[in-house]
Amino acid sequence: MLGGGGSIQLVRVFGIRIGASLSWFAVLFVVIYLLSGAFQDALGGSSGEAYVVAVIAAILFFISLLLHELGHAFAARREGIEVLGIDLWLFGGLAKLNRDSQTPGEEFRVAAAGPLVTLVIVAVCFGVSAIIQGADTALDAALLDEGSGPSPVELLVAFLGSMNAILLVFNLVPAFPLDGGRIARAIAWRVTGDRTKGTVFAARLGQIFGVLLIGWGVFQLSSDEDTVGAVWWILLGYLIASSARSAVVTSRLTDRLEGIRVEDIMDREPLSMPGTTTVMEAEDRWFGGDSGWPWYAVVDEDGRFLGIAEHEAVEAAIGQGRPALQVRELLDERAPAGQSIGTDQPLEAAIGAEPLRRLGAVMAVDAEGRLRGVLTRDQVQRALTATAPSRG
């Protein structure tokens, strides 16, 4: 679904970094608090029992969100798209990919994979509920009807199924950037043969849907109903509308950059240091003096890009009493995938690169992973200016 911002790493699944923002932790506690009361009414038991079941339910629901995003991630991997990680946050999750889809079919398969996983979860949960409780009782438990009398296990299964059913329906609304909007984008792209037209079509639907959600939230506020829920809908609507608007702008920029590749505008003499350099040498020879440069690319003896050494990490290693530590030991082995881009890649693929946003540059490598250049934010901006339509 949606996502953004930095995150705290929770775990790695099949090499994929799973992170959560601070907002996710806040939502987790709020969900547990709200479910505790509802579960106590449904179970008819003690508050302690309801709290334990609420904790388990919240964790299972967020695991189901993670499975949804893993569906996108594995589908992307099958298409040859690098997965940079998955983040859970206030409004759901986001599988972060190193590039956009290049064909309508690729877009459709990656977008549809998440909802397909959610559909399987819904089917399994309701199937199990119907078997152990009966269809009518399972529905009552899923709706948290007071006095429905389910056991904790029955309540958990029914609740997980109903929440994922709601998630599935909402996420399939044809409004970009929801999965349904991405599916709509793929279909429009296939019909028109133009990715920009497909994106604009789906994004306009996203803007309309976002405005409707904001309107619904405002209506709830004016009716003095659920204030928290009203604010939630307003925030969600604003996020969807603004994301859709950004997609239109980015798509039009992509059109202007068509035909330009990373190697066409990159600096072919990037600043770098050998991976065997000690942190003390790095501090004295690269970061020290008047250079003022906050990071350097790190390469091995064959010139292959290993990652980016940042001054803060070097200083931290020295402060920990490890001056002989080699800079390559400061790097994550998966760093090259997230901090570099192929020299033959289209320029628009670099625009959303995380290093370009955070460091102001992304490393350019050849097919063997050797460092060949650096693409800076200024170079991208100059390319955009050069390709801007004249107003004369």
Image (spheres, helix red, strand yellow):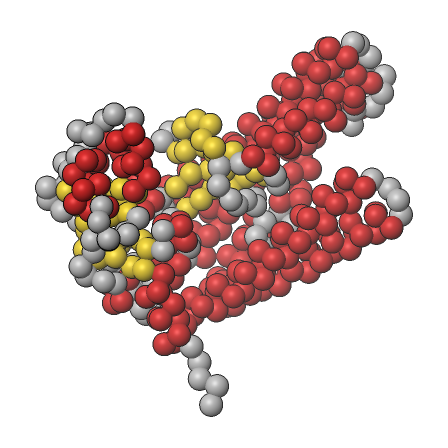
Vertically, is 224 above or below 128? below
The answer to whether residue 31 shows anywhere in this view is yes
Q: Is residue 27 left or right of residue 220?
A: left
Front position in the image: 229 or 22: 22
Where residue 104 appears, as percent x and y from the top left, is 45, 57
Looking at this rendering, what residue extends furthest in the left direction? 301
Residue found at x 89% / y 47%: 223
Q: Tell me what residue is drawn at x 46 percent, y 47 percent.
A: 109
How many numbered dots are placed on residues in this image? 0
Quarter of the image where the N terminus is located: top right
Q: Is residue 231 above or below residue 201?
A: above
Q: Residue furthest front?
A: 289
Which image quadrant for residue 59? top right
- Which corner quadrant of the image does residue 156 belong to? top right
Q: Position of residue 265 (x, y in %)?
A: 27, 67
Can you name the residue that lies furthest to the bottom here? 392
Residue 368 can be seen in this image: no
Residue positioned 69% across, 28% down in the render = 31
Image vertical order of residue 360 relative to residue 27, above or below: below
Q: Residue 282: x, y in percent? A: 19, 41
Residue drawn where x is 65% and y is 50% of the image: 173
For residue 191, side relative to residue 319 (left or right): right
Of residues 77 and 211, the one drawn nearer to the viewer in this rendering: 211
Q: Quarter of the image holding residue 230?
A: top right
Residue at the extreme right: 223
